[in-house]
């Protein structure tokens, strides 16, 4: 690539990495190399390591796509005023209908902003139509805050005997009911013999329009 001042090139590398993170696919070192036309992969690595040392990026050890945006980066670094983004793991799929086997099959990451920095978040892809009335459609991605204590009426991801579903939680006289938002589906009523594990509360719904 044409010679440019080191600081300018580094800013361009940071902008590219941020864009890729926002798309849910942090780049590898070699992808940075190819994008900028560096002759050696070490040139890309040096820019990325410098950005990590400067606090503009963080790096998860042992991950080829481990570059992340640190909390506060948007207002303290190369892109003033930009929102803070956190990368939330997309763990797999969850049924919005009858209970189905929970699948923890990491598929990538989902960029999320506006959630507390200490929130333990994960994302799941929804299948089924039982939550249409709540605006949760098949193929949507739900962002879930991992927590066991939830309030009556909240939309949760619940696990029973290794199977998971997304439903609205109803607590009635000591037992748990998982209610759909679709009249074609019946509530799942659990008695005391059923082991219910609340995986978390749905805090955001994502939809990709194609």
Image (cartoon, rainbow, N blue to C red):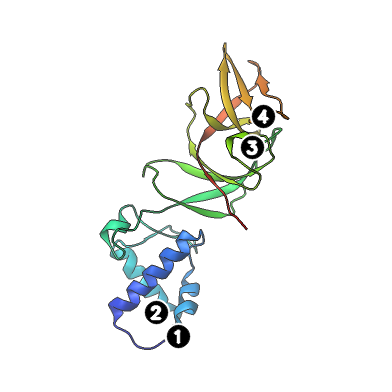
Quick one: 75 or 86, which is closer to the camera?
75
Front in this rendered view, residue 201 or 108: 201
Residue 35 percent location from the top left of the image = 48, 77
Q: Earlier in the sequence, mark 4 or mark 2?
A: 2
Q: Nearer the viewer, mark 1 or mark 3?
A: 3
Q: Quadrant of residue 61?
A: bottom left
Residue in the picture at 66% in, 37% down: 96
Q: Dot 4 corresponds to which residue? A: 161
Residue that lies at the very extreme toward the top in this rendered image = 173
Question: Could one spot residue 122 in this view of the protein?
Answer: yes
Q: Mark 4, residues whose alpha carbon is within 10 Å: few (<14), some, or many (≥20)?
A: few
**Residue drawn at the location 36% of the way across and 53% of the way down:** 84
Residue 187 position, x and y percent, is: 67, 24
Which residue is the extreme one toward the left? Answer: 76
Choose the circle earlier in sequence order: 4 or 3: 3
State the CA–CA distance, disc 4 to disc 3.
Answer: 25 Å
Q: Position of residue 73 (x, y in %)?
A: 31, 57
Q: Is residue 189 left or right of residue 41?
A: right
What residue appears at the point 33 percent right and 72 percent down from the top-left corner?
Answer: 11
Real-space CA distance between mark 1 and mark 2, rounded to the nearest whole angstrom? 8 Å
The quadrant holding residue 170 is: top right
User: Badges 1 and 3: C-beta atoms under 8 Å apart?
Assistant: no
Question: If you read the primary sequence from the N terminus, does the residue marked by circle 4 or circle 1 appear first?
Answer: 1
Can you say whether 38 is above or below 28 in the image?
below
> Label 1: which residue?
39
Q: In front here: 209 or 175? A: 209
Q: Residues within 10 Å of mark 1 (few under 14, many from 20)?
A: few
Do the numbered discs 4 and 3 sit on residues whose CB atoms are within 8 Å? no
Q: Which mark is residue 43?
A: 2
Contact? badges 1 and 2 (CB < 8 Å):
yes
Question: Does dot 3 land on a helix, a strand or a loop?
Answer: helix
Q: Residues within 10 Å of mark 3 (few under 14, many from 20)?
A: some
């Amino acid at each position: 690539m044409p010679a440019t001042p080191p600081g300018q090139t580094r800013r361009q590398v940071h902008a590219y990495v941020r864009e890729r993170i926002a798309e849910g696919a942090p780049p590898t070192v070699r992808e940075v190399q190819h994008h900028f036309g560096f002759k050696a992969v070490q040139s890309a690595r040096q820019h990325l390591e410098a950005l990590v040392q400067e606090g503009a990026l963080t790096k998860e050890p042992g991950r080829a796509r481990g570059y992340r945006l640190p909390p506060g980066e948007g207002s303290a670094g190369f892109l003033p005023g930009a929102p803070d983004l956190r990368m939330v793991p997309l763990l797999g799929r969850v049924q919005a209908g009858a209970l189905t086997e929970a699948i923890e099959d990491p598929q990538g990451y989902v960029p999320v902003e506006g959630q507390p920095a200490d929130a333990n978040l994960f994302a799941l892809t929804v299948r089924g139509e039982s939550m249409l009335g709540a605006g949760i459609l098949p193929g949507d991605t739900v962002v879930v805050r991992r927590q066991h204590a939830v309030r009556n009426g909240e939309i949760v991801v619940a696990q029973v005997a290794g199977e998971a579903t997304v439903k609205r939680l109803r607590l009635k006289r000591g037992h748990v009911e998982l209610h759909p938002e679709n009249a074609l589906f019946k509530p799942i009523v659990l008695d005391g013999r059923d082991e219910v594990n609340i995986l978390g509360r749905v805090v955001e719904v994502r939809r990709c329009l194609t």
